[in-house]
Image: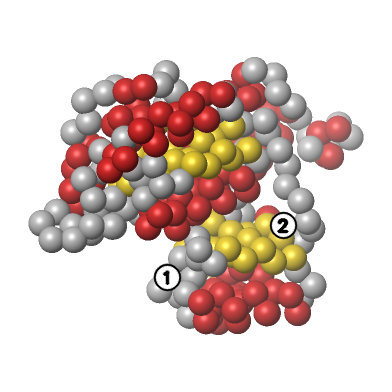
Amino acid sequence: MRKLARGEISVEEAIRTLKLFAIEKIGEFARIDVGRELRRGIPEIILAEGKSLEELSEIVFRSIETAGRVIVSRLDGEIMDKLAKKARRRGLNVEEYRKARMLVVRKTLGRRETGGRVGVITAGTADIPVAEEASIIAEEMGCKVYKVYDVGVAGMHRVFDAVKTMVEADVDVIIVAAGREGALPSIVASLVDIPVIGVPTSQGYGFGGSGVAALQSMLQSCPLGLTVVNIDAGVAAGTVAALIANRAAYRAGVK
């Protein structure tokens, strides 16, 4: 963009450069998409599962050189402690989210606000870790997040207050996390004119346990306006919700 401003390249050349996939290779075990946030509005999110501390550290610290911020998901407690300590030794800012099993590592404090508004509801207390995962992603993508937890269909009267909160906040999209039979997203979708993202969680046991019944129930939902992500996929739900909310804010002219 500086070259464009100085007249050194054409508009067409600038657009082509911005659209190119910028990939940085790390040894033989990782290739980083360093242009993802610029291209798609999605921050660099690194899945910790299946990676050693050494691999994870190298990916995080190399990514932060270009991205300025990295989100690490699905961390166990020991790896989280060690990675956070390494990052702080380098003078980086670290935010730890134990319930969501996440770290946010950044060069500088603060995040840009987009004006997007995301609602997050859970059926039960056990669904909160997945909901928190979604909430953190949406917040890191610039959205304001409104949360109401533990309002499942076992006590139907609680649902209406949760929906009222979301409508009053004028959210652009609602994430609903539920395990067991996964009925709550369908009920919420039947009450609002707001897009709903259902997140089946792995809460539940016996026949259809580990989130299978919840996923099947949400996929068979009768009310229109509900879409569904995979079991325990808080990151996916938070990302899609933030993209929707940010697009709505942009169209509305919110700066």
Per the rendering, the mark at residue 84 is none
Q: Element type at marker 1? A: loop
Per the rendering, the mark at residue 68 is 2
Q: Is residue 203 visible?
A: yes
User: Tag 1: residue type?
Assistant: Glu
* Above or below, comparing residue 175 to residue 179 in the picture: above
User: Tag 2: residue type?
Assistant: Gly
**Mark 1 or 2 closer to N-term?**
1
Q: Label 1 crowding class (10 Å Cα cut-off): few <14, some 14-19, many 20+?
A: few
* Above or below, comparing residue 96 to residue 168 in the picture: below
Disc 1 or disc 2, which is closer to the eye? 1
Residue annotated with mark 1: 49
Which residue, as the protein is rendered here, is positioned at the far left? 207
Q: Where residue 52 appears, x then y in whole percent? A: 48, 80
Q: Where residue 21 appears, x then y in whole percent? A: 56, 47
Return the residue nearer the eye: 8 or 59: 59
Q: Is residue 237 visible?
A: no
Q: Is residue 101 left or right of residue 222?
A: right
Residue at 68%, 34% in the rendered image: 114
Return the residue nearer the eye: 188 or 161: 161
Return the residue nearer the eye: 116 or 131: 131
Q: Label 2 crowding class (10 Å Cα cut-off): few <14, some 14-19, many 20+?
A: some
> Tell me, what colour scheme is on the image?
secondary structure
Quadrant in the rendering for residue 219 = top left
Q: Where residue 232 appears, x then y in whole percent? A: 35, 54
Q: Is residue 154 left or right of residue 55?
A: left
Image quadrant for the C terminus? top right
Residue at 20%, 39% in the rendered image: 217
Residue at 49%, 70% in the rendered image: 75
Q: Is residue 178 left or right of residue 18?
A: left
